[in-house]
Image (spheres, rainbow, N blue to C red):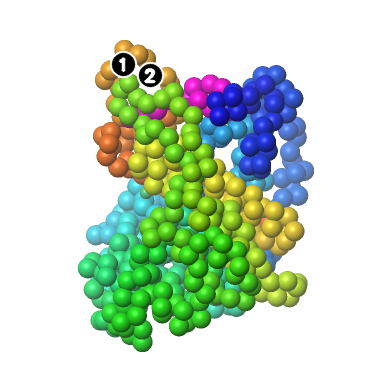
């Protein structure tokens, strides 16, 4: 492990790095000198296509700010290396603020995944905690989502996540509710008017199934095992209501592999969030943790990787033929955020690299199907920062930190300082990277707002 991490700047390509689909820093080089691709004007010009896309694949790294991307890159391929996600030809930045629940005319500068997701999924800002519903509303007040519009227009739809499927990011596409915690029929204490017992559309789990999304893959089986309290499936679990509505339900990787196109599929691979890819020491207050290398390949084999779920989703959603309607697919790398909250640098990096491998699957599909708009972005910035080495006498250093041995063979100090050590760390309010390729991709260039992504995707699919 240590040896592998040590070779990047010597230009020796390890199989692990090649397999990851990443670009090594320096094939055959001697030092960590950055690349020089020369004049890229023509390449960028050739990457600009207007018009319609047959398919849209949105890759969403939860909490994947520029800082998280840089940490993952430094660790896994070295500072001068490039991740797969770095290869998209058109890149911009976008702003992510939410609005205040009590006064929607004022911004909330730090967004959560619910308000942020509502922004990119519907084109409207809302307040933190809301799932595609109107800030300040007391009744059932939905904003129409890109997935709903695509489905109504005859596109197939897919929603893939390493979190519980009822978590905010997958939820915003096919459910509407005032509080993100109302994930299963027995989690509805903050969402009374939405309860099926009260004539509402039900919890997030119920709504995802009732929306008949073609492909739903992720964690959160515990929510779907809860019992529905009203409507036609009262007394049944959400899983049973899914089966009654034509879903094939699978709960492990081998069963997922057997699902054939034409079946509507609900894959629930963990009772909660899906298992982490990597482990390591948590960041600690002075003197910190490490120097460490991460322990890789920790996900149990019965849970599919995000890349495997992406590959299966594309197989199930793909429609051959020029005139056939395509699909909308969202793929979320969810636990970049969750491990950033937990001050767990190895957990965070492992999820970021797993997300990057899923992007490689999407780009391979787009290579064969160039009428596919591929977008890679995030929903909000987060805590982790690369800082200078902490001097051995700086006992009052704030926050928690860990030293990691990177692929360069150098030490990188990662700090978690938005909350006291040991507490859940906080999101931050910075703008984010958005990158794209395919029809309409030029609309991510420059500085846009997250809500504009909705319009870019809708335009690409001919929905507005
Ligand atoms: Mg999320
Ligand atoms: Zn978070």
Tell me if I can see residue 121 in this picture: no
Q: Is residue 258 left or right of residue 418?
A: right
Residue occupying image coordinates x 45% and y 47%: 276
Q: Which residues are magenta?
A: 400-413
Q: Where does residue 201 sit, x and y in percent of width and height?
A: 35, 78
Residue occupying image coordinates x 40% and y 55%: 273
Q: Is residue 270 above or below residue 203?
A: above
Residue 373: quadrant of the picture: bottom right
**Around disc 2, counting alpha carbons within 10 Å, would you say few (fewer than 14), some (14 to 19), or many (20 or more)?**
some
Q: Is disc 1 in contact with disc 2, using a CB cutoff of under 8 Å?
A: yes
Quick check: is the Cβ at mark 1 less than 8 Å away from ligand 2?
no
Residue occupying image coordinates x 37% and y 34%: 282
Residue 394, labelled with which disc?
A: 1
Residue 238, labelled with which disc?
A: none
Residue occupying image coordinates x 69% and y 58%: 365
**Spatial distance from mark 1 to mark 2, Cα to Cα?**
7 Å
Residue 153: quadrant of the picture: bottom right
What residue would you read off at disc 2? 390
Secondary structure character of the magenta stretch overall: strand
Mark 2, secondary structure of its residue: loop
Tell me if I can see residue 41 in this picture: yes
């Amino acid at each position: 492990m240590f040896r592998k991490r040590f070779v990047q700047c010597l230009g020796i390509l390890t199989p692990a790095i090649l397999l990851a689909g990443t670009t090594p820093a320096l094939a055959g080089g001697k030092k960590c000198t950055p690349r020089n691709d020369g004049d890229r004007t023509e390449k960028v010009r050739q990457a600009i296509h207007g018009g319609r896309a047959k398919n849209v694949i949105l890759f969403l790294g939860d909490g994947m700010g520029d800082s998280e991307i840089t940490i993952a890159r430094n660790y896994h391929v070295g500072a001068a290396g490039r991740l797969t996600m770095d290869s998209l030809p058109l890149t911009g930045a976008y702003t992510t603020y939410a609005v205040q629940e009590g006064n929607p005319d004022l911004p909330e500068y730090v967004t959560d995944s619910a308000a942020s997701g509502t922004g990119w999924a519907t084109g409207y800002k809302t307040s933190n905690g809301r799932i595609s519903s109107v800030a300040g509303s007391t009744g059932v007040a939905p904003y129409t989502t890109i997935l709903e519009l695509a489905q109504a227009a005859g596109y197939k739809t897919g929603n893939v996540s390493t979190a519980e499927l009822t978590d905010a990011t997958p939820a915003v596409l096919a459910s509407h509710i005032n509080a993100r915690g109302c994930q299963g029929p027995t989690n509805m204490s903050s969402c009374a008017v939405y309860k099926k017992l009260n004539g509402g559309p039900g919890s997030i789990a119920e709504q995802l199934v009732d929306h008949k999304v073609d492909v739903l893959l992720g964690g959160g089986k515990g929510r779907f095992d809860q019992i529905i309290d009203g409507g036609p499936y009262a007394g049944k679990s959400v899983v049973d209501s899914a089966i009654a509505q034509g879903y094939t339900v699978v709960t492990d990787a081998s069963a997922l592999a057997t699902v054939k196109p034409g079946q509507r599929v609900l894959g629930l691979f963990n009772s909660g969030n899906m298992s982490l890819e990597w482990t390591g020491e948590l960041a600690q207050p002075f003197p910190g943790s490490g120097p460490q290398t991460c322990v890789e390949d920790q996900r149990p084999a019965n849970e599919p990787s995000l890349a495997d779920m992406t590959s299966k989703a594309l197989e199930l959603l793909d429609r051959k033929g020029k005139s056939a309607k395509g699909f909308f697919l969202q793929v979320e790398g969810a636990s970049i955020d969750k491990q950033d909250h937990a001050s767990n640098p190895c957990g965070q990096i492992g999820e970021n690299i797993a997300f990057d491998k899923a992007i490689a699957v999407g780009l391979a599909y787009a290579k064969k199907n160039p009428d596919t708009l591929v977008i890679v972005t995030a929903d909000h910035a987060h805590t982790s920062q690369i800082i200078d080495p902490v001097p051995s006498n700086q006992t009052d250093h704030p926050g928690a930190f860990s030293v990691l041995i990177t692929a360069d063979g150098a030490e990188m100090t990662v700090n978690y300082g938005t909350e006291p050590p040991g507490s859940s760390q906080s999101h931050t309010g910075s703008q984010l990277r958005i990158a794209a390729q395919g029809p309409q991709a030029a609309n991510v260039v420059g500085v846009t707002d997250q809500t504009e992504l909705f319009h870019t995707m809708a335009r690409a699919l001919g929905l507005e």
